[in-house]
Amino acid sequence: METRDLLVIGGGPAGAAAAIRAARAGCSVTVFEKGPKGRDKVCGDGLTPRAVSALNELDIPLDDAHRIDGLRMIAGRTRRELAWPSNGRFAPHGAVWPRRRLDEALIDAALEAGAEVLFHTEAVPIFDGDKVIGVEADGRRWTAPLVVVAAGAPGTVARMLGAERDPREPFGLAIRTYAASPRHLDRHLEACLTLRDEHGTPIPGYGWMFPAGDGTVNIGVGALSTMKGFKKLNLNTLQASYRSLVQDEWELGPDLERPRAWRLPMSTVRRHGPGWVAIGDAAGLVNPMNGEGIDYGLESGMLAADLFVNDPGHVAEAYDQQIGERFDAFLRTGRRFSFLIGHPWILRSGLRVAVGTQGIASITLQVMGNLIDNESPGTAGRVMRVADKTLAAADPLLRRTRAAA
């Protein structure tokens, strides 16, 4: 048995953030990452202003990332190009940073802070009764007062902890690839909100063009499980259909790699227990409106580490409470809203409203940018609080009448 202050399962943004913060505070930390250093995680690569702020807080230089000044939303023939809000709460800009480079920068910072990182190492928790007391990997064992689970979408570790996705809640699927484009230096993310499958069914999701600033763009589509026919949805066909829509405007070259798909968890039945906490995707911290979770992963990782440093004996309960206060209302509203837009006629009407006026489009921008939570001031915060109460009352009906998957 080797002993550490903190053990982290998963070396993505959430796990690396926890390791950086704890190691800089003087804790002994070991991170277990099943992939290689600089792994390529399938992702849209977009960083919201919220994510940029979190990276700034971690002192991660963004020199290697491509700056993004706003979002271009497309709904049918309507286009709106909006700048990220400059309200002082978050950075006034976002970025696009391919995950292999972002993840490597974060794990390098963890190593520099003094954390031990074991690559190509898949760890699982070990128990004393119902309490997690450490991890086991490659025939070796480590113990620690706290195990931080940052293993991404639910898998073996989640099953062992009883922290799997809530089967009653929606989830998402997405697919992406890269292509060369002369517009790779564009300073706006682009989101097409009016997608249809091969049968003409409106898709609750969106297609994206994220310019990477390195000669390429990240092109992909995502869809929510609340749509009719979701189980039969062919992501490759949807990707090809969306690509044909943007081909000429973006002057796309051939795909630079085979399109790759991934699942987006948007809930969990548990995010803490005796001796452990889950952060990032492993805690279901993914915005149902856009599939984004890097910023939540960074924030939840830092929070877990800070609480551990301040009070190791009560970190799990305090973490769950503070994460709930910060994010639960917004994410709960997003999940309920996803049931609503699973109905095609509601989706069509809703999209016209979402980008129909400058004022409502500005709120949509903040929702799509993960810029709203329990502390959000102004109109956007008030709208989300009203939506939370309204959709809570409508939730039983929304679930009974959900579109057949």
Image: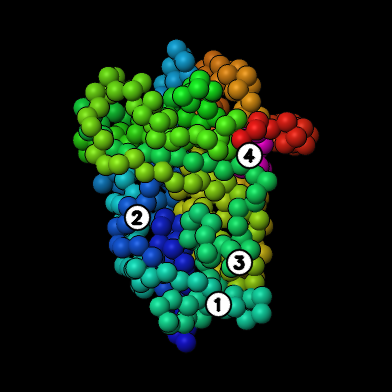
Is residue 203 part of the magenta span, yes or no?
Answer: no
Residue type at numbered disc 2: Asp
Residue type at numbered disc 1: Ile
Visible residue check, residue 212: no
Which x, y percent locates residue 112? 31, 67
Residue type at numbered disc 3: Leu
Upstream in the sequence, badge 1 or badge 2?
2
- Tag shown at residue 161: 3
* Separation of marks 3 and 4 at Cα, in angstroms: 23 Å
Q: Considering depth in this image, is 141 or 330 the residue closer to the camera?
A: 141
Upstream in the sequence, badge 4 or badge 1?
1
**Residue sitting at x 47%, y 30%:** 206
- Tag shown at residue 32: none
Judge left or right: residue 19 versus residue 254.
Answer: right
Upstream in the sequence, badge 3 or badge 1?
1
* Separation of marks 4 and 1 at Cα, in angstroms: 33 Å
- Tag shown at residue 103: 2
Residue indicated by mark 1 = 126
**Residue sitting at x 55%, y 38%:** 231
* Separation of marks 2 and 3 at Cα, in angstroms: 26 Å
Please provide the residue range marked out in magenta.
Answer: 329-339
Residue indicated by mark 4 = 335
